[in-house]
Image (spheres, coloured by chain):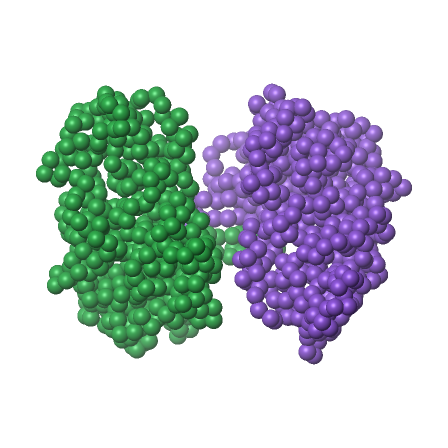
Amino acid sequence: MTNQGSPSIKDGSKSQYVTNAELSDGSSPFEFTRAPDLAMLKRVMVGHGYSREALIKTGGLPSRDVRIDVDGMLTRTSEPTPFNVLARLFLLAGEVSTDDAGKAIAPLGVDALIDFGLLRAGSTLGTVRAICAIVTFGDVLILRDFEPHVTGASLKCDHVLGVGVSTILLANLTVRFGNERLLDIGTGQGFHALVASDHARAVVATDVNARALCFARTGGLMNECEHIDWRNGSLFEPVANEELFDVIVCNPPFVIAPPHDTVAIGGRHHGDDLCRTLIQSASKHLAKGGYATILFNWHHTTDEDWRERPKQWLEGVDADAFIIRFRTSSVEEYANGWLNESGQASSDLHAQGSAGNTSPLKDWLAYYTSIGAKRISLGVCIQRVRSQNQWPVISPMRRFDHYSLDSLEDAAGNQIQRLFYGEALRQLAARDADALLDTLITVTRDLEVDQQLTLTPEHAWGMKQATLKQTTGFPMHIGIDAVVMQFLTLCDGSRTLREITAELSKRFNAPLDQVVAQSKQLTQRLLSMGYVEEWPKRS
Amino acid sequence: MKREGTSEITHLGLTSAHALAGKATGPKGVPSGLPGVLSHVGYTTENLMKVGVLPSSGLAIGDPLPLWELLVRASGDGALEVLVRLFMLGQFESREAVTRALSPKDGPKVSVEQLEAAGLVIAIEIPGKIKAKVDSAIKANAGVRALAGLVPLGEQLVLRDFPRAITGQAPARDYVLAVGGASVLVAQLTPRAKAELALDLGTGQGFQAMQAAAHVKRVIATDVNHRALQLAATSCALSGITNVEFRFGSLYEPVAAEAGEFDLIVSNPPFVIAPPQDVIGYSDQSLSGHALVERVVRGAGKMLRAGGVCVLVANWAYAGDEARDRRWAAVPRRWLERESDTPCDAVIVHFGSYPARTYAFKWLEETGTPRSEISAERMARWMEYYETIGLEAVAFGALVLKRCSPGQTPIVHAESLDTPPKGHACGDVLLRTLAGVREVQTRLAISPETLGAWKPTLTKDAVLQRELVVGKGTWLATDIALTQRGGIPRRAMIDAVTADLLALLDGSRTVDDAGRRVARQHGVEGSGADAMARAREVVGGLAKLGYFEA
C-alpha cells in the first residue's frame, strides 16, 4: 500500500477529539434500522467499475495529493453511464436524475437509499444527491465527507476526512499477527478498523465524532466487515476496564496549532499534549506481547535534540519503544505548509480563528513562540509490552531512528516485530554470552542481495560489493562479503549460531574462536537491523 | 574587459544589472584575500547545503524555497550567516557586520573597501543633499549589498545574478544565469582528455570554461553578454584560474582565427525556443526557433581539428509526420547531413520530447516566472509563435560531435535515455560508442565472419549487477544486468552465459572463439555456428553501447 492518500487536507488532520457540542448530539445521518443491503450496493458499484484506478483515469481523483478537478470531471462524466452517474453522485457531490441514479444502483432502489439517508432529494424535482463521498482503496470502500472545494461549503466541525497520506502510513506501520484483538483510537472514516477486520478476531474502533462512526459503520456494512465494535468517546474512555488488546493503532489529529483555529486540524489540546497523553497511556491497554503504533507530532527548540521530548514522555512507561522521525520542519515551514495545503479549509479557519485582523500565519507563529516551539517533527511511536518468559526484560528498549517518508517500502509490520525481537535478544546476549550461541538463527526470507561484479586483472568477474537488503519496510542495508553470504545461507532455523560457526570455520578453514567472535558481532548487527526472525529455542 | 554604456545606480534595494560592470575594475581588481576569507569562515558548498541555502544537488536550480525560509535558515550574527545573506540571498548587511565577517580572528582578512573597489559589493549611498545632516553613526553603520550572487561550487567560486525569487524583479537583458541542470549535463557529457585548445561558446557565468581549464592548456570563452564575461572573468580570478581568455561576440565569430584548431568545443547555448524578448538568458534573442543550436552544430566541424570533439545540449523543434511518429532524431540528422566539407561523427542523445503547450509551460515555470505572470495571453503568444515557426513538439537532448579523419564517412548514433545521466563523467563512453558503431559497421560491411574475427576488449568500467535470493541453502540470481560505471543509465538484462562470454573478451581471442568456448562451458546445445552467430549478435549490440575499448 504505497498509494498516496486521498486529496484533501494533509496528514492526519482529523476532527475526532473536538469537544464541540455539535459533534456528539447523537443524531445519526443514517437510519440503520432501515439499512438496505449495503453489501449489494458495493457489489453494484464495483460491478460498474467504480474503483480508485478508474476514477484517477477519468481525471477525477488526482493520483497525487492535489485537488479534484471538479469542472473537468463534470464535463467528462456528462454521459449518464452507470459509472459516470456514480462518480457524479459519490465523488463530485453532483445532482443526478432519479432515473439515472436508479439505473446505476439497480437492483437497489433510490427510495431505499433515501430512507437510509445516503441519498437526498436534489434541489430540482426528479434529482437526487448523495450526502457523502464514497471512495475505494484496494478492495475497501470508504465513506467520507465531500471536500469543501468540491461542495463550495465551509468545513463543518464534524467533517469526516478521507484516507490521507498519514492513514496509509499508519496502515503500513501496523503490526498484524492474525487473530488479534485490535483497537483503533480515533477511527474517523474507519479505514484501519475495516482493513484489520480481515484478519483480527475482534476490532474495537472509537471516535469522539458520532458522525464519523456512522460513516465507518456504514463502511463496515458495505464491505461486510464483521466483529467491529464502534464506540463513541474520547481517547481510551470507551475501553476503560476492557480486556487488553494485542494491537493498538492511532492516527490522531496531531497538528500543533493555536486553539480553536480549526476543527479539522488539531483541536482543543495544547501543543503536543494530545500526542503525549496517547503515548503515555497506550501500553496500559496492551496485552503481553502486544504492539501500539501511534503517529504523532512534537515540537522542540532549535538546539534541542529531537529525541529529547519523546524520551521524557516515555519515562516510566513500562514498554519497549521504537520512535521513528520522518521529518522536522521549522515552525514557519510547518505553519505555512498547513495553511497553504489545507486550502479552503484553512481560509475558513482563519475567519474563525483569528480574533483580531492579524494574518493566520502570525497567529500560528505567535502561538509557537508562546509554547517555546521552534521546530516540529512528524514521527511514529511504536511500543511493545514484553512477555516476560519469552523475552525477559533487562531494560526497556528506547530506540530512535530517522527515515524519510519515501524510504518506506510497503508494509513494515513484520520488520518492526523483528526489530523488537532483535533488541530483546541483544539485551539477553549482552548479559549471557552463551545465550546467543545457543539460539536457532533464522534470517528473514524477505531479503535480497544486490551484487556488483567487475572485471578482475585476470579478466574474470569478481565481486566488488554486495548489499544485503530487506524488500519491505524501512531501508536496512548492510554491505556484506562472500563469507557473510555463506553465513546467511546457513541461518535457516535448523542450526544454532554455535553450529553455524563450526560449519563456517570448516568451510573456510579458519580458526573457530575467530569465526565465533566475528559471527557474534555480525549476528548482533543483523538483529539490530531486523534481519532475524523470532524462532523458538530448541528444547 | 570594458563595458560600454554603464548606468548609475539610482536607488537602493536594487541589483542593477549594469552596476557591477559600471563599478568594477575587472579581474585585476579582484581582492586576492577574499577566497581565503570565504574558505576560513566555511563558506563552502558543503556548509551552505548544511545551512540549507543550497539544494543538496549543490546547484541553484530554480531556488524553489521562498526567500523568508532561506532567511530563517541563515539568521544569526556569525560570519558565515552574514556572508550567506550578503552573497547568496542578496540582502543588505551593515558595513560593520560585513567588516567583522571578513576579518575573522587568526585568519586571512579582506576589507569591505576592497570588495567595493572590485565591484563585488556596493555601499548605500546617502544623497549629497542630506549627507551633511546625517548622524556620523549612521554613516559608519551604512549597509552594503552584493551586486551578484557568489556561489561556491566545489573548489570554485562562481558569480551569477540573484534569482528572481530573491530580487522579486524580472531579469534584465544582461542577466547572468546560475549553474543549472543543463550546465551540469554538458559538463558530464564532456570527455576530459588532456588537450591544447578549447572553446566555451556562450560561456555565461563561465562554468564550462572553468571545468575545461582543468584539463585543457588554453580555453577561449565567448559570449554576447558583456556582463557575463565580466562575472566569468572575476569568478576565474577568484578561483585561481588563469588559462581562460574571454572574448565578446556571437557564435564562432570571435574565434574565426582559430578555425580548425580546437580539440574541444563545449556549449550550453540559450536553447529555449520562445518568442523574442521572453525568458531572457534562456533563449537567444536574435535567431528564431532552433536556428542558434543548428548553427552551433553545423559550424562545429570547421572549428575542430580532425578527432576534435564538440559537446552541447540542445532543444529542437519538429512537426508533421516526424512529430506524429516520434522521430526525434530526424532534425539533427538533417543538420549533420548538410555539413559536407568538414563532416563529423555524432551521438544524438534524446532525453524526452514535449508537445508545444507542455513545453511552453515547463519553461515558463523553470525560468522562475511567477504563476501570476503565466497568463492565458502569454501562453497564447507562445503558441502563436510556435505556429509561425511550425513547431509541434520539442526534443530535449544533447549532441556529441567528433570531426572525422580525412576520407572517413561520418556515422550517426541516436539513443534515447529515459533518465538523464547523473553524477559521473560520460563523455568517454559516448566516444567509445562512436568507435564501436564504426568498428561493427565496417566489419559487417565486409562479412559476418569479419565481425567474428574481431578481438574486442570488454571495458574495465563494465559492471555486472546481480540480484540474489536464498533458495535451498544457496544463493540464486534472479536478475543479471550489464551496466557501466559512469553516468549513462544504460542497462542491458543478460543471462549467465552472456556474462561469461563477456569476461572471455579480453582482446586475446576472437568473438567466434569466445562464443564456442562459453557454449562448451555451459553445455549449451546447438552447433558451433549457432554459438558463433549468437556471440556476434551480442558483441555487435554491446559495441554500439560503448562496452568495448576503442
How many tags in the picture? 0
Q: From the viewer's perspective, is B101 left or right of B8?
A: left
Among the chains pictured, the one given green colouring is A
Q: Is residue B142 visible?
A: yes
Q: From the viewer's perspective, is B133 left or right of A128?
A: right
Q: Residue furthest right?
A: B257
Where residue B504 appears, x then y in whole percent? Answer: 58, 45
Where residue B193 appears, x then y in whole percent? Answer: 74, 50
Among the chains pictured, the one given purple colouring is B
Q: Quadrant of residue A403?
A: bottom left
Q: Quadrant of residue B111?
A: bottom right
Q: Residue at x 71, y 71 (%)?
A: B135
Q: Is residue B197 above or below residue B38?
A: above
Where residue B384 appears, x then y in whole percent? Answer: 63, 26
Q: Residue at x 12, y 63 (%)?
A: A241
Q: Quadrant of residue B505?
A: top right
Q: Which residue is more in the foreground, A270 or A403? A: A270
Q: Which residue is more in the foreground, B120 or B440? A: B120
Q: Is residue B88 visible?
A: no
Q: Quadrant of the C terminus of chain A?
A: bottom left
